[in-house]
Image (tube, rainbow, N blue to C red):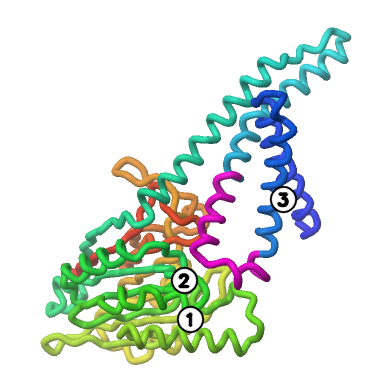
Amino acid sequence: MPPIVSFTIGILIYAAIEFYGWQAIKTAINPSSVSTARWVYWGLTAAFLILFMSYRPVLYKVIPRNIGVYLALFFVIIFLSKIVTLLFLFPEDLVRLVRFIAAKVSAAPAAVGGITRSQFLSRMALIIAAIPAGTLVYGVVANAYNYKYRKVAIKFPNLPEAFHGFRIIQLSDIHSGSFTQTQPLIEAVEKINKMDADIILFTGDLVNDRAEEMEPYMHVFDKLRAKHGVLSTTGNHDYGDYVPWDSEAEKEANFEKFKGVHKALGWRLLMNENVILERDGQKIAIIGIENYGGKHFKKYGKMDLAYPGTEEIPFKLLMSHDPSHWDAEVRPKYPEIDLMLSGHTHGAQFGIENKWMKWSPSEYMYKQWAGLYEEGKQRIYVNRGFGFLGYPGRVGILPEVTEITLLRG
């Protein structure tokens, strides 16, 4: 579809959403309040449009990130409510149109509902729209830092005996630039340390864009402890690709600072390289590559640099941020990779997950989007993310800390 057509369709859909949002309010309220409501409704609409269009190039550098997060939340809630009113009222208008045409053709009076029916439908639309809005608010208040500590045991016949029971804590997608609280982070780190893992593996997206986003939380995450320390790799947000930098040099300086953050935290950042762990003369390999994205994200990862030196190691674990890398390259080209750890999807921070049902919009974009998957002898675990991005909360898909136990068998 040509870009101009897609743009035109998008504009028409947006105009319809705004029109029905206004119609619902105008019809539902007292006629004497319509004039004031009109100024408020369209004033807010114009303000959010200006904010949306100018945020990245202009206001990104002015508005504090925590304020920007809640402005985005307010915009999402209002816009979602308008979409609900459209879905509720548009079918009724189609019925009215069909009746009107039928009446013209048959020369009978048009059976169009009166004002009472219109008011009823509009008020019902606003009430129904309040349900998802309230759910999103609950997701911020109750679930943004409501960490789910998951335990997963995975058996591998080729795991060296010395590593039977080896425990890994996987963290992913911290997105420090989105945090608005510190105490829940401190409590989470303390709980992780009490788990006394053999190693902590962080699979990318430490920041949203800028290395400086970690500065308020350095004293929190530098407390993470494990027997073999913390290994990390990069995610798509860590490169600053989504920021309007003044120059390429400024962007490169930010990434160098980002790498320095890892060093200051005491974490070892693996950038297309590997680490060999040894116990009682037996070895496993941990491979870490830079972000290797799907069709919408850049491919910085280079397995041809990261893999050499692990050929003779009997068990190999790959840290790769984007789970689409598994089907794109790992499975077809590196069948010796036993386990891949990823993040990236966040489970869309929205969905349904219980013992009866597991669903999220993520499944329409990613074949592997949350939890453990198996193809042949290879496994991948996709962490649902520690932090959040855009929407500052979680609905149904909670933030995650994963304890993975490797078993021989």
Whether residue 336 is visible, yes or no, is no
- Marks 2 and 3: CB-CB under 8 Å? no
Q: Amino acid at mark 2?
A: His
Residue pictured at 38% horizontal, 81% vertical: 288
Residues at marks 1 and 2, CA–CA distance in whole angstroms = 9 Å
Range shown magenta? 55-78
Taking 362 as reference, is 119 left or right? right
207 up-or-down from 78: above or below: below
Residue pictured at 58% horizontal, 31% vertical: 126
Considering the numbered disc 3 on the image, is that residue within a helix, a strand or a loop? helix
- Marks 1 and 2: CB-CB under 8 Å? yes
Judge by depth and name the residue closer to the eye, 211 or 400: 211
Residues at marks 1 and 3, CA–CA distance in whole angstroms = 42 Å
Residue 325: mark: 2
Number of the front mark, 2 or 3: 3
Closer to the chain start, of discs 2 and 3, is 3
Q: Which residue in the structure is indicated by mark 3?
A: 46
Q: Amino acid at mark 1?
A: Gly
Considering the numbered disc 1 on the image, is that residue within a helix, a strand or a loop? loop
Whether residue 209 is visible, yes or no, is yes
Q: Position of residue 229 (x, y in %)?
A: 24, 82
Judge by depth and name the residue closer to the eye, 150 or 311: 150
Closer to the chain start, of discs 1 and 3, is 3
Principal secondary structure, stretch drawn in magenta: helix
